[in-house]
Image (spheres, rainbow, N blue to C red):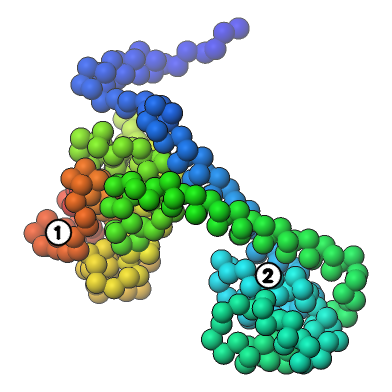
Amino acid sequence: MGPRKSENDPKDAQVILHMLRIGATQVYVDPLAAGINDLQELSKTHETISKAKTQTWHRILTHYLPLYFPEIARFAGNSRSDWFLALIERFPTPGSITAMGREAFAAEAWPLVGRKVSKAALINDIYETACSSIALPVPADAAAIAMFRMIIAQARSLIQQRNRIEETAQATLAQNRDYQLLIKIPGIGPINALTILAEAGDLRRFRHHRQFLKFCGLDLATCQSGTFRGRTKLSKYGNARLRRTFWMAAQVAARQCDNSFRDKLGRYVAGHAGDADRRRKAMTALTAKMARVVHAVIKTETEYRPFLERSDARWKDPSKPSAVRAQHATL
């Protein structure tokens, strides 16, 4: 028995024909022909390794350290730094520190800690922490500690792989004009710029920023079928990696000082500091604004200029129904 035909098939065909007539189509971009295949592989591999590194880091913080050296977790700091992992790989338990004595431990830990302010005080603090630790009394040569060291080695290897990918990406894009323009936008660093170029390719092919917003899934859409008409919201039918990248960039830009993104967020949530829903809508608007700014900067080949669109002439209160459809265009 063949597949059941949907009752909407004739209507769907008419919609497709109408879209073809008006030119509402997307042009397929071959990564090899467009010269972005290497960028895509760098970006996707970086994301895969970063996720694996994060999972391994969380496993260390939530399983191994609470059992074998819980107090050392307060020295962890930034997960991008390798010195902490190098230290606990060499000294995975408090007993491995206290067995050496204070001076011997300081001499061996000194090159591991790296360039730190007040390094001697930090090493002494770590030793005092080991002396008063409540960790499980597991010997350093136990199989459990061997597994702990194996996970630490995996985390360090992932950090090294990620760093090599970032160095390769920066060397590849060093002379790329679009890359240089992107990293000057608040919230967009080297990896975000790499992801944008890898996923979007040449942004100049989008004649209007609304086309680019649609490509990212940041356009407004209304689900409807027959007499049913849903609520107007973000379509999310576009490129999910671009949408996530712009969201993260907007989060960073909103926390920086003196730029139009932070200014826009302040005007959006003014008087509604405790309204989480309003802040979420504001961040969504900032995400669309970030995509629009990126498109404008690349298309016009001009550097980002803060507060270029600071005028409130086109700003509308998002709580008013008349502003719902215009939200993505005005912000």
- Among the two numbered marks 1 and 2 on one chain, the one whose residue lies closer to the N terminus: 2
- The residue positioned 29% from the left and 73% from the top of the image is 257
Q: CA distance from mark 1 to mark 2?
A: 46 Å
- The percent position of residue 76, horizontal first and vertical second, equals 62, 75
Q: Is residue 236 visible in the rendered structure shown here?
A: no
Q: Are dots 1 and 2 in contact, CB under 8 Å?
A: no
Looking at the rendered image, the disc whose residue lies closer to the viewer, 1 or 2, is 2
- The percent position of residue 12, horizontal first and vertical second, equals 35, 18
Q: Is residue 79 left or right of residue 221?
A: right
Q: Nearer the viewer, residue 114 or 121?
A: 114
Looking at the picture, which amino acid does disc 2 mark? Leu
Q: Nearer the viewer, residue 52 or 1?
A: 52
- The residue positioned 63% from the left and 73% from the top of the image is 83
Q: Nearer the viewer, residue 172 or 312?
A: 172
- The percent position of residue 38, horizontal first and vertical second, equals 47, 38
Residue pointed to by mark 2: 85
- The residue positioned 82% from the left and 62% from the top of the image is 147
- The residue positioned 56% from the left and 53% from the top of the image is 164
Q: Is residue 25 above or below residue 290?
A: above
Residue pointed to by mark 1: 309
Checking the image for residue 32, the label placed there is: none
Looking at the picture, which amino acid does disc 1 mark? Glu
